[in-house]
Every structure is written in C-alpha cells, then in structure tokens.
Amino acid sequence: MNTEVLRRVTRRQQTAGVTLVEVLIVVAIMAMLAGGVAFAVLPAFNKASVKTAKENAIKLRQVVSLWRTDTPNECPSVNQLKKDKLLDKVGGDDPWGKPYKIKCTDGEVYVESGGPDGKRGTSDDIVVPSESDEAEDEE
C-alpha cells in the first residue's frame, strides 16, 4: 500500500509544472498581441504629436506677439524668449525635440516646425498661421 501511494506522488511530481515549449508558445502569443496593439496605436500617437506641435506653435506665436509690443522692430528667437523668461526652459521645442523657428514679417509672426521628419521645407512642415488659416481670416 505504501508503494502505491509513493507511485502516485512520483507521477504527480513528473507531470507538475510547464515545459519550455509551453512557455515559448505563451511568450510568442504575447509578442503577437503586443505587436498588434503597437500597430494600432502608433498612427494615433503620430497624429497627436502633429496636433500638439500646432497647438504649441499657436501659443508660441502669441508669446512672440506680446514680446513684439515692447520691441516692434525686432523678431525674437526661442532662446531670447527663454532668456526673457517668457518661455520655460523646456519650452520652445516641438514634439520631435527640434526648436521652433520664428519669422517676423510686416506685422505678421510665423512659427515653424520641421514636422515629424525634422526637415524644413517638406510637405509635413507645420507653419502657424498656415495659408488655410490666412484664407479663413480674409473671408
């Protein structure tokens, strides 16, 4: 009788736990799920970065307009605005880590970002005010 009990315990010990193959299958399934989620979320993240860049450029344009009330014939840089404490130390950079570029013309202020590719003069650039904004203002 004691031998029979010992055999049952030994069989249970041999079947307890998981094998390496089972663990690898679970890890592979989890990796596929994570890849699917990343594939779905990445475009939304890029769209949110573009929206954030536009909103920050609009705010930066307002700060430049305020700065120009004291010095109407000059156009500040992002560093000048930081020096004058109109921007905090981390402000002035777009979501991709590049500084915004400020251009001042006859009474108008333009704030530009290179966009997701970081290169100025490409189709993904962010410019505030954009031509579509100006067309709306004229109507």
Image (cartoon, rainbow, N blue to C red):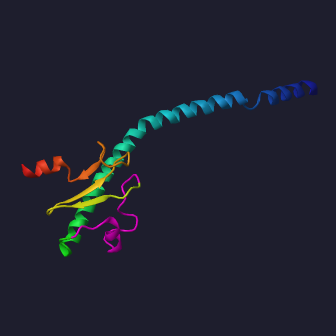
Taking the spot 32% from the left edge, 49% from the top edge, the residue there is: 120
Residue 116 relative to residue 104: left or right: right
Residue 36 relative to residue 12: left or right: left
Q: Is residue 55 above or below residue 31?
A: below
The picture places residue 59, in percent across and down from the top left corner, at 26, 61
Q: Nearer the viewer, residue 130 or 122?
A: 122
Q: Quadrant of the N terminus?
A: top right
Q: Nearer the viewer, residue 58 or 71?
A: 71
Give the quadrant of residue 9: top right
Q: Is residue 76 above or below residue 21?
A: below
Answer whether residue 97 is magenta in the image: no
The picture places residue 82, in percent across and down from the top left corner, at 35, 70
Answer whether residue 80 is magenta in the image: yes
- What secondary structure prevails in the magenta region? loop
- Residue placed furthest toward the left: 139
The picture places residue 28, in percent across and down from the top left corner, at 60, 30
Taking the spot 12% from the left edge, 48% from the top edge, the residue there is: 135
Residue 135 relative to residue 67: left or right: left
Q: Nearer the viewer, residue 130 or 77?
A: 77
Taking the spot 68% from the left edge, 28% from the top edge, the residue there is: 22
Range of magenta residues: 74-96
Taking the spot 32% from the left edge, 47% from the top edge, the residue there is: 50
